[in-house]
Image: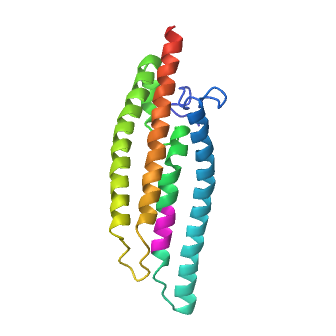
C-alpha cells in the first residue's frame, strides 16, 4: 500500500554525533540517557501501582487513597523529565506533510523558527515552574489528599524537566547556527 509521503524525506535529521558536540551537549545527552531509563522505571512502577489498586478494590473490596496521586506524580515526572530526550531525537509530534511541500532551505528555517518559539515558551515555563517550586518549598505546600505528599516533589520534576528541555532546544538552535556558518564559509 502506498502512502502520499513515502517518497518524501520525512525523517528528522540525525542528531550530531557526540564526538562532534561540545561538552555541554555530551553532558545533556548523558543526562537524557539516564532520565529515559529512570522515566521508564517510573512508568512501570505507575502501572504496578494502578494494577495493585484495581486488584485490591475488586477482590478485597478495599479502597486505597494514595495510588492515583502516586501514579500521577510518577507519570508527570516521567513526561516532563523525558521531554528533552524526545526533543533530542525530534520525536515530538510534527506535521510531516509540510516537510515534503517546502524546499529544503525553507524547511531548515522553519525548524529553527519552531525551535526558537519553543525555546521562548519552554524558557518561560521553566521560570514559572521554578517560582512555583520555590513557593511550594517556602510555604510547605502539600497535596490535599489524606496521603498529603509534599508538592515540591512533582514541581521539582516539572522544573528540572522543563529546564532540560530548554537547554536541549538551545543546543539544537546553536548546532543549526553553527551548521549554517560552516556551510556559508
Decide: is 91 above or below 107: below
Question: What kind of colouring is applied to the model shown?
Answer: rainbow
Q: Farthest residue toward the bottom?
A: 61
* 97 relative to 46 in the view: left or right: left
Give how far across and how far down residue 84 sits, in percent: 51, 44
User: Split into 4 quadrants, where in the image is the N terminus?
Assistant: top right
Magenta stretch bounds: 69-75
Decide: is 39 above or below 16: below
Q: Is residue 47 magenta?
A: no
Give how far across and how far down residue 36 sits, in percent: 60, 51
Between residue 104 and residue 31, name the one nearer to us: 31
Does the image show residue 125? yes
Q: Residue at x 59, y 68 (%)?
A: 45
Q: Residue at x 49, y 9 (%)?
A: 184
Q: Residue at x 58, y 46 (%)?
A: 32
Q: Farthest residue toward the right?
A: 19
Decide: is 85 above or below 132: above
Between residue 36 and residue 155, name the one nearer to us: 155
Amino acid at each position: 500500500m502506498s502512502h502520499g509521503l513515502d517518497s518524501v524525506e520525512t525523517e528528522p535529521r540525525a542528531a550530531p554525533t557526540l564526538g562532534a558536540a561540545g561538552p555541554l551537549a555530551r553532558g545533556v545527552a548523558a543526562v537524557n540517557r539516564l532520565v529515559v531509563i529512570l522515566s521508564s522505571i517510573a512508568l512501570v512502577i505507575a502501572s504496578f501501582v494502578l494494577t495493585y489498586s484495581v486488584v485490591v478494590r475488586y477482590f478485597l473490596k478495599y479502597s486505597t487513597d494514595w495510588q492515583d496521586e502516586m501514579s500521577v506524580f510518577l507519570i508527570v515526572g516521567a513526561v516532563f523529565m523525558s521531554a528533552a530526550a524526545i526533543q533530542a531525537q525530534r520525536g515530538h509530534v510534527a506535521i510531516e506533510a509540510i516537510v515534503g511541500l517546502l524546499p529544503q532551505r525553507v524547511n531548515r528555517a522553519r525548524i529553527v523558527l519552531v525551535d526558537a518559539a519553543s525555546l521562548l515558551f519552554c524558557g518561560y515555563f521553566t521560570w514559572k515552574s521554578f517560582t512555583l517550586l520555590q513557593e511550594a518549598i517556602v510555604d510547605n505546600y502539600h497535596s490535599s489528599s489524606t496521603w498529603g505528599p509534599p508538592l515540591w516533589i512533582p514541581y521539582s520534576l516539572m522544573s528540572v524537566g522543563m529546564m532540560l528541555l530548554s537547554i536541549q532546544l538551545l543546543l539544537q538552535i546553536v548546532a543549526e547556527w553553527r551548521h549554517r556558518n560552516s556551510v556559508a564559509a
